[in-house]
């Protein structure tokens, strides 16, 4: 996907996020984020947007210090102002990304074609996944276009877990294959005692294969939907291992 497509996806997801937050109410629980309310989720994503904006706006080459990060984000507003605060931060991020030069140089934390490509892609998927959380809070289904689902799976597997595969450990080697049924894309996750090795393409000898539409796989691999209606071939314990081990943390 192109940078502009990621920015467009970020913009749409943020608008949907606001609608769902207003519908749910700040005190509503978020089933996909245990112990969080909608208030916590709005604060989190609003914080992340402002944090990301600082790197793009200032072409910041080094990680922000705690004090600099606090200054970039600003004080957390009262409940009555929380959703407008989110809206303002989301709009500022979208505007900064659209105005940024293609040769922008700034800090980023995952492999990408460029810093601008990284921030546009990462913030699009950050917002889309948390939109799914809000939709869960109001009992609304979620989904994305096929190409965005493929892109999101690829970001999760080939950047997050390619860089952080040590989190996916198991005593005995286990292989999970992921196949999109509506696109020519697949991935193989080989887990073992020291972590995981992840490649594009399908391993025919996988212990478990998870297959379904890219949108559904995307949400399932982020643990935002169940897998009961997807095609699971082989040892379901391997898929359970993924679902219990594959967590992304802010710190």
Image: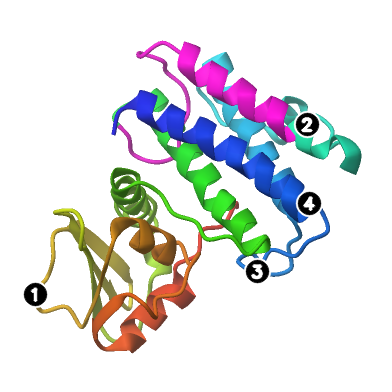
Residue 211 picture quarter: bottom left
Dot in front, 2 or 4: 2
As for residue 92 lying within the magenta part, the answer is yes
**Label 3 neighbour load within 10 Å: few <14, some 14-19, many 20+:** some
Q: CA distance from mark 3 to mark 1?
A: 35 Å
Q: CA distance from mark 3 to mark 4?
A: 13 Å
Q: Which residue is mark 3?
A: 31
**Disc 3, SS:** loop
Q: Which residues are magenta?
A: 86-112
Q: Which residue is mark 4?
A: 39
State which tag comes first along the sequence, 3 or 4: 3
Q: Which residue is mark 1?
A: 204
State which tag comes first along the sequence, 2 or 4: 4
Q: Is residue 83 above or below residue 167?
A: above
Q: CA distance from mark 3 to mark 2?
A: 24 Å
Q: Which residue is mark 2?
A: 84
Q: Nearer the viewer, residue 195 or 80?
A: 80
Q: Is residue 78 visible?
A: no
Dot in front, 3 or 1: 3
Q: Is residue 106 left or right of residue 24?
A: left
- Residue 173's disc is none
Q: Are marks 1 and 4 in contact (CB under 8 Å)?
A: no
Q: Position of residue 35 (x, y in %)?
A: 74, 68
Q: Are marks 3 and 2 in contact (CB under 8 Å)?
A: no
Q: Quadrant of the N terminus?
A: top left
Residue visible at 69% across and 38% down?
47
Q: Position of residue 111 (x, y in %)?
A: 33, 39
């Amino acid at each position: 996907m192109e940078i502009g497509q990621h920015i467009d996806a970020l913009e749409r997801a943020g608008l949907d996020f606001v609608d769902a937050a207003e519908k749910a109410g700040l005190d509503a629980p978020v089933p996909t984020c245990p112990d969080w309310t909608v208030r916590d989720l709005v604060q989190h994503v609003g914080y992340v947007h402002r944090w990301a904006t600082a790197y793009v706006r200032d072409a910041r080459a080094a990680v922000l210090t705690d004090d600099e990060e606090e200054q970039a984000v600003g004080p957390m507003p009262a409940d009555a102002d929380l959703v407008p605060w989110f809206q303002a931060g989301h709009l500022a991020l979208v505007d900064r990304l659209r105005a940024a030069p293609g040769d922008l140089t700034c800090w980023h934390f995952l492999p990408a074609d460029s810093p601008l490509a990284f921030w546009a892609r990462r913030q699009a998927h950050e917002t889309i996944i948390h939109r799914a959380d809000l939709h869960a809070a109001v009992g609304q289904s979620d989904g994305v276009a096929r190409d965005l689902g493929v892109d999101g799976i690829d970001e999760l597997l080939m950047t997050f877990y390619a860089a952080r595969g040590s989190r996916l450990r198991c005593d005995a080697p286990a292989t999970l294959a992921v196949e999109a049924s509506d696109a020519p894309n697949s991935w193989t996750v080989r887990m073992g005692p020291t972590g995981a090795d992840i490649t594009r393409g399908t391993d025919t000898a996988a212990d478990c294969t998870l297959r379904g539409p890219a949108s559904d796989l995307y949400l399932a691999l982020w643990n935002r939907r169940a897998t009961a209606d997807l095609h699971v071939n082989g040892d379901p314990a391997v898929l359970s291992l993924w679902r219990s081990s594959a967590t992304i943390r802010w710190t």
